Amino acid sequence: MNSGKMKVEKLGSTRKVNYVDVPQSHKITKSTSTNRLWSFFFVRNWCLRASVAKKRYLGTALKFLVFFVLLPSLSFAKGTVKISGFEPAYKGYHIEFYRFEDPISREKTVLASFKIEDDGSFSTSFELNGTTFCMTDFDAYNASLFLVPGNSYELIFPPQKKVTDSQKRSPFFKPEEISFALKNSQPRELNRRVQDFEMAYSEEENRRFNQIYHQKSKAAVDSLKVRLSVLFPKTDDAFFEGYKFYRLAFAEFALHQGKSFDYVKRYFINQKPNLDIPPCAQLFEQLFSNYFLFESNKVQGADFKAIVGRSDLKGIENYLITKNGWDSNLARLVILQSVKDAYFEGHFSQAGLLRLLDQAASGNWEQDKKEIAKRLKTKLTYLQPGSRIPDFTMTAFSGEKHQLREFQGKYIYLIFSRVANPIGRQHLDELKKIAPVYKNDLQVVNLILPEETGRKEAILQQGWAGNFYVVDEKTADTFRVKNFPTAYLVDSKGMLVWSPAPNPLDGFEQQLINLLKQKRREDQRPNAVEGS
């Protein structure tokens, strides 16, 4: 998003895209002296209904819908949802809608997938247990949609903005987050209600911006709340009512950055947090991200840090309840979020944090939180040394399908390579020297993407070590490959040893020698015990 620049378009009768950039002066942050990052998130939204857009200009839109959370609804009503549309420009695209199982682990669950036909038509139906926020990724977009059981949705896709798969894997790539436009959307439809509310919120906030964010005026916040309650009176939609309640909490948040105990009590204790509501989940993250570190850095935080260091789950929960006046529900949610935040930061033992998750999953916590703990552990340890390598299928140049388990018995150097890349060829050339020396202990498996199958003859002529197989983009994504080449070392039982593995030009051979020596010493220990 371009700081300091704002472009506002008025829509005519045809579908267009609105890009609203937030000026630099609108970016509100809190000092990070407490080692906690606080920021508001800004998003571009598009495709407002033309009939509405004709009546109003978009102001500087402080859009909230960035970290959408996808969970079952408050009502748990069951029913069939139908999604359809006509988008000839997207013919042949495979679209996959998914949601997150919970806002902390963010484990994806696919709801539906379909192919857009050659004539541009698409249609799919599936069952839902409640109001669900789903999303799908295509081209440069991450597009989102609220789904209510029993409803049908005719989607309007944004203009194409293609990016290559390699561009998507770049660590610098970020999808453009949009909301799907709907054909013939009615005023009472949830997506329409949320969109209209966000537009009104932005307009009313802009009118009071200086008073709220610079003067910290409670009167201005109260005025904003009253005005929006008049514009959007109470409805019979519990989900939308919850959305408004927590969305308005962000205006109050600006007064004291959520430090007030009364503020936490109002939104997370007196009112049991419904993390299936996007603003509630976002506010929760704003308030409690990196909370273990935040609590440990307090003047008397050494005691808390010691409790975390001992992996004392009950002690942590009691501390948060006693010191902060929280209830067990909030304390447990914060513990789960904090384990996730702390795992890769280096301030706490990873093994100790995993023990906390094991205790949460096997103890007397509520079942939903036990499931979060299980999913979180699986996600945190994914592709970590000691974890099992993901299953995948690879195709030989002959067309035969293979599994990695066929090579078990040796260490496997699994390398995602791109032979068109000079660095990739250098790695392959070096492996050509190394692999024969350790042929009894090491098997090289080279994985390339379909785009390089045309180089088959050139690959075979090089005499590079190991076998070459073709895998799809999904496999590369499964292994979180961002750059080529990327390698992993797998042991004889299919467990990851190095993730990622050092490359052949950067000490791989010496580390392999050390690993083989260690393994031989371990293999000899039982024999030594038996002979004593």
Image: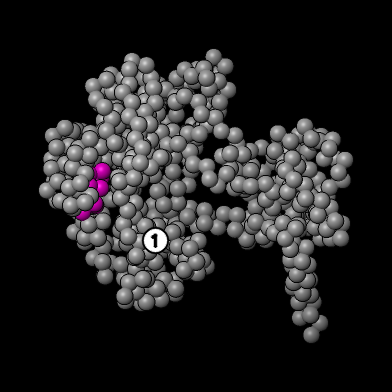
The image position of residue 168, as x and y in percent, is 56, 39
The image position of residue 193, as x and y in percent, is 27, 30
Question: Across the whole image, how many numbered discs are drawn on residues?
Answer: 1
The image position of residue 473, as x and y in percent, is 63, 38
Q: Is residue 249 magenta?
A: yes
State the residue in front, 210 or 523: 210
- Can see residue 72? no
State the residue in front, 446 or 26: 26
Q: Is residue 135 magenta?
A: no
Q: Amino acid at mark 1?
A: Asn
In what element is the residue under mark 1?
Answer: loop
Image quadrant of residue 46?
top left
In the rendered image of this protein, does residue 148 appear above or below residue 406? above
Q: Main secondary structure of the magenta part?
A: helix
In the rendered image of this protein, does residue 16 appear above or below residue 350? above
Q: What residue lies at 22% left-to-right and 40% top-to-bottom?
A: 205
